Image (tube, coloured by chain):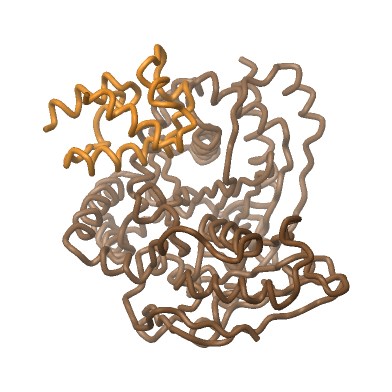
Chain colours: A brown, B orange
Amino acid sequence: MIAFSGARSGTAPLTWGQRAIWDTIERTAPDDHYFNFGRVLEVPRGARPASVAHVSRGIGLLLERHESLRTLVGPGPCQDLRDRGELAVRIVADADPAEILAELTANAFAYASEWPLRVALVTRGDEVTHVVLAFCHMASDGLGAEEVVRDLRLLLLRGRLQGGAPPQPFDLALWQESPAGRRQAWSAASYWEREHRRMPPTMFHVPSGGAELPPIWRGTLNSPAIDLAAQRLAVRHGTSTSTVLLTAVSALVAEVTGHETVAVLPIVSNRFRADTRTAVTTLSQEGLFVLDVEKSRFADLLATAHPAVLRAYRSAYHDPADRERIVAETSRDRGTPIHPYCCFNDMRFTEQAVDRDEALIRQALSESSLTWPLSQEQLNCRFCVHLSGAMQVSLTADTRWLSRQDIERFLFGLERLIVEAALR
Amino acid sequence: MLKERLAELVSESCDGQITAAEVLEASVPLSYLGVTSLAQMRLIDAVEREYDVEIDLGGDVSFLDSVEGLAAWVSAAR
């Protein structure tokens, strides 16, 4: 057990980011363990040998510093911030940290009663070698978890952290309700409404005829060629590989569905402002990316995509209650449900773009491989693209709308589109 | 002065990976120097705070791609 005591307790409304992930968790239950994620920190050389007591102290300080790690979901729902408590820690000798992480993330959190962080220490002899952290998505998103890991690393090395307290979701919720927060919300809401009145009701509206049991399947294409080709395109067109991939996914969605206007919901970090950049909380929300795909050349499409990406990024910092109202109103006015059910999540933390050689890209094509790492019952979407590494592109889709064959065809089609554009 | 300050904001928006001097001397659009759309979003926030203006992303946003463009836009908006 690690005892901790922070500076304050109390209740506050959920922030926009917390509200967005909460709605998604509720819609995905009982498969909501889907949103658990984690990090493994290898104890840095300078902190070795680290005793269980030393590491536990560091984790206690972490919980004191970041209020989201000692916040439960209270009735309402609301933020239920506690100032003190005890966190159970698992200690396992000579284990594979990745396996321990899989165990820690396997079950959904008890949101109202369980601390939103599960911790295991992997030991060899008397020494802690790895700290395994499993996060409840109500406490943090991936970038927030990076902050936690960085702080923990420094705590292990130096025993303390410099600098003032980071921004806390408790205060963020109060800002979001202030006049300045409402102005931001209003500006984002007007954009969502305008686009919801013109975009196609949904992206995938024709049954695939190839529904599986369970219906949700993920295909993952491991494709170094996509990574290299996207880099070449990014350098050539003065953009990022993320924009290249989002644009390519949109172009291909247009091609397979026949829509001339494509709406995709990219997951956006919402860490552009000084009061959000280093916060440990879930800030990422869906933005709305709308692209008119009438241009045939990919290069022309990239130029159009740039301002559309900026609009999408800004629209992501919105009040989910506004969005819910807009979806309901526009669905009623247009006489059909309006929702893209088409999302895009670039989970890479950094990206580098170098003008890669043609031969290298061609050669990399032979290294591509497809796997099917996941199938499950529930997903509140029809089409979700995730990017990680260099580069795994996965498509998690509802086979009632895209068969497994469609998933495979899409992933290889995406590779072909990007590689051909890069070699043109 | 305006251009120098804007160049600093551009540099801060990309975590100093491009210096203010490089921004001022740039002969190509800033995006080709590595100012990504994420950095542009930080820049937009910084410019809005510093000059108490609001940038409308619905129109032409090519002014974000050079310090001259930014300076002209800020001067006109203030």
Q: What x and y, as percent, mark residue B47?
A: 26, 37
Compare residues A201 and A308 and report the one nearer the observer.
A308
Report which quarter residue A218 is drawn in. bottom right
Left or right: A141 as drawn, with respect to A202: right
Left or right: B18 as drawn, with respect to A194: right
Q: What x and y, as percent, mark residue A82?
A: 44, 84
Compare residues A302 and A84 and report the one nearer the observer.
A84
Q: Is residue A346 above or below residue A225?
A: below
Compare residues A264 and B35 and report the one nearer the observer.
B35
Residue at 55% of width from left, 33% of height from top? Answer: A241
Q: What x and y, as percent, mark residue A219?
A: 70, 51
Q: What x and y, as percent, mark residue A374?
A: 71, 61
Q: Which quadrant holds the N terminus of chain A? A: bottom right
Residue at 52% of width from left, 40% of height from top? Answer: A253
Q: Residue furthest top?
A: B27
Report which quarter residue A95 is drawn in. bottom right
Q: Is residue A54 above or below residue A9?
A: above
